[in-house]
Image: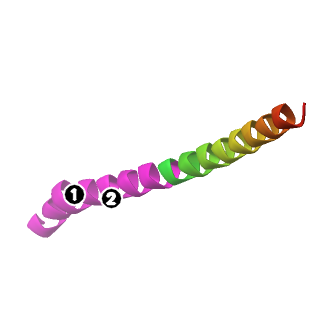
Amino acid sequence: MTYLISLLFYVVPALILLWFMVNIVSSQRERNKILREIAEKLDHISKKADWDKKGE
């Protein structure tokens, strides 16, 4: 009985916390990937605009 209580009060919250941390890291990686793609596109547009100004 005490084993079951310790399982409920120590292991289960630890597993929930671990799942939450993994979930947060995963979402942050996805967010960073999207931001990196946006930055690359903006950099590409900026370089194209600079090239067009030189051609005038």
Q: Secondary structure at mark 1?
A: helix
Q: Is residue 20 left or right of residue 11?
A: right
Q: Is residue 17 above or below residue 53?
A: below
Residue nearer the viewer, 20 or 32: 32
Seen from this angle, which residue lies furthest right? 56
Which residue shows up at 22% across the image and 57% down it?
8
Which residue shows up at 54% across the image and 48% down it?
32
**Magenta-colored span:** 1-27
Seen from this angle, which residue lies furthest left? 2
Q: Secondary structure at mark 2?
A: helix
Residue type at mark 2?
Leu
Which residue shows up at 73% across the image and 43% down it?
41
Report which residue position mark 1 lands on: 8
x, y percent for residue 16: 33, 54
Q: Is residue 18 left or right of residue 47?
A: left
Question: To which quarter of the image does residue 51 belong?
Answer: top right
- State the CA–CA distance, disc 2 to disc 1: 15 Å
Q: Main secondary structure of the magenta part?
A: helix
Residue type at mark 1?
Leu
x, y percent for residue 18: 33, 58
Q: Is residue 21 magenta?
A: yes
